[in-house]
Image (spheres, rainbow, N blue to C red):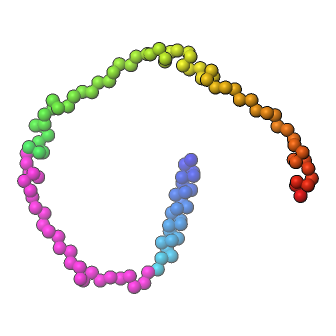
Amino acid sequence: MKTIVKQIATGTFIALFILVGNVKSEGAETKATTHKAAEITLQLEQWMTDENIWNTIALNTTEFVQETEAELELENWMTNSCSWTLNNSFAKEIEPELAVESWMIDENSWK
């Protein structure tokens, strides 16, 4: 499995390398003199410095409830032998024997 994954990855890498190596673009240069990147300054907002939001010690811990799971119990169907014998519900299939038919050995049908 590991070998197959490595072979696929290697083949993909080689194919990608061949595709990228053959790319020739001409005239795709653009000048960025018409575009000016103007970034606005970051603003500090009230909620960013609010102690009530960021103070994790002040969280009400009573909101969290310990989740418990129900105790496991054995039920009758788990130990009943009729539940686990599946052969009773299937009908036995009988196949006919293989036979050589006349068309199989006829010379005219194979010419």
Q: Is residue 84 left or right of residue 42?
A: right
Is 2 one of the magenta-colored residues?
A: no
Count the numbered circles shown: 0
Q: Nearer the viewer, residue 6 or 38?
A: 38
Q: Residue at 54% of width from left, 54% of height from top?
A: 6
Q: Splitting the image into 4 quarters, where does residue 62 fall?
A: top left
Q: Main secondary structure of the magenta part?
A: loop
Q: Which residues are magenta?
A: 25-51
Q: Residue at x 24, y 27 (%)?
A: 66
Residue 53 occupies quadrant: top left
Residue 104 coordinates in the image, percent (x, y): 87, 47
When the figure is inspected, residue 17 is found, relative to residue 34, above or below; the finding is above
Say whether residue 45 is magenta: yes
Q: Position of residue 58 (x, y in %)?
A: 10, 37
Residue at point 62%, 21% (across, down): 88
Q: Residue furthest bottom?
A: 27
The quadrant holding residue 70 is: top left
> Residue 97: horizontal and vertical position, in percent?
81, 34
Q: Is residue 101 left or right of residue 43?
A: right
Name above or below for residue 36 compared with residue 83. Answer: below
